[in-house]
Image: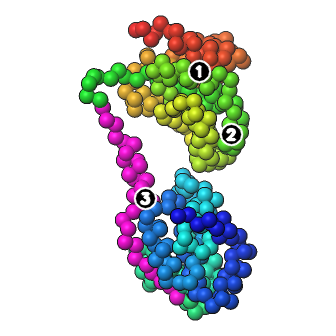
Amino acid sequence: MPDRDAPAKILSPEAVRDWVSAQRSLGKQIGFTCGAFDLLHAGHVEYLAEARRRCDALLVAVNSDTSVRALKGELRPINPEQDRLAVVAALQAVDAVTLMAETRPAELIRLLQPDLYIKGGDYSAATLRSKPVVEAYGGHVLLIPIRSRTSTTAILERAALLQLHEKVPAARRSQPPRLVFLDRDGTLIRDVPFLHDPARVELLPGVLEGLQQLQDAGFTLVIVTNQQGIGLGYYSEADFIAVNQSLLRRLFPAGIRIARIYYCPHSLSDDCECRKPGKLLLERALDYFHASAGECFLIGDSIADCQAAAGAGCHAVLVASQAPPNAPCTHRADSFLGAVAWILSSPRLLT
Ligand SMILES: [Mg+2]
């Protein structure tokens, strides 16, 4: 059962020092452990329960988002630090939780001087980098073997494995999917230069209704987007994904599913082949879905979108009042719904 006092267990760097002093004045033996705790699983629960059995008060330092990224790569953590703190704090075995800005705990250990520095898994005391720090003030290192085979990595691998599988119905040969490629910025959502703030995602008029119509007509929806802000270092891939999540959250309640998102993270100077007007993003999707280019459409707001579609052999519908008259598109529409209406009435669907 979650601990009802959980929020009170989350302590600021100042409060955690007071907490340690208070526990010490009560004569309690303080245990300290740390980790990312990104996807809390049975192994974590078992480990923290065992750690608590070895001390009188257990303090857990949870790695900050920045430190998790430094340790595990740009796309981690999956869960933000405030959520990870809340989940760890909800465990009965845990007496206090604090955020750890550093990747390694040595500094925090030196500051707080817990009686026990507890570590789980396949470390050996001899190789533990914090051991000299702990022993310098008379503390002890305690290693707890992890018996559970569960790990965050194993969970992510299993999720990725499940995504790879697709059961094909035995009854009939399915038709190749028809794709509608959707440019993101300026087509689905308001164009904000170098958008990286999920709160600034704003669906453009008619997008929700138009996507519903396309989906109801059997089209598979695929986003193709240039994100040179990543290549220029203006925002991270994690920021880009957070913006996409904000967009998808607006589409899900209407039952709209984006099948895949293809993106180019490069800047102009990278001279890549994927950046629209290049056709590589679309070709990757056509390959992935085994789709026929001539049956597929793109809705975009720029000449580059149209050139990418033309290069891949798809039909381009341009939604842009400012575009030059010679834009290489199959059709021009004055609104997103207008583009959808043209696609749905296109005689090409009959071929
Ligand atoms: Mg655009």
Instruction: Tell which tag, 2 or 1, sits nearer the viewer.
Output: 1
Question: Which disc is residue 16 wearing?
Answer: none
Type of amino acid at the residue the image marks with label 1: Gly
In magenta, the rendered stretch is 140-168
- Residue beneath label 2, please? 195
| Residue at image coords 38%, 68% | 148
| Residue at image coords 60%, 58% | 83
Mark 2 and ligand 1: say if the CB distance to the nearest ligand atom is below 8 Å.
no
Q: Relative to 198, is 350 on the left or the right?
A: left
Question: Which disc is residue 153 wearing?
Answer: 3
Label 3 Cα crowd, 10 Å radius (few <14 / some 14-19 / many 20+): few
Question: What separation in Å lies between label 1 and label 3 (alpha carbons)?
Answer: 39 Å
Tell whether position 118 is magenta: no
- Residue beneath label 1, please? 210
Type of amino acid at the residue the image marks with label 3: Thr
- Secondary structure found at label 3: helix
Residue extending furthest toward the left: 170
Q: Relative to 268, is 191 on the left or the right?
A: right
Comparing 342 with 87, the one in front is 87
- Secondary structure found at label 2: loop
Upstream in sequence: badge 3 or badge 2:
3
149 versus 295 height, above or below: below
Comparing 10 with 296, the one in front is 10
Type of amino acid at the residue the image marks with label 2: Leu
| Residue at image coords 66%, 17% | 335
Comparing 324 with 291, the one in front is 291
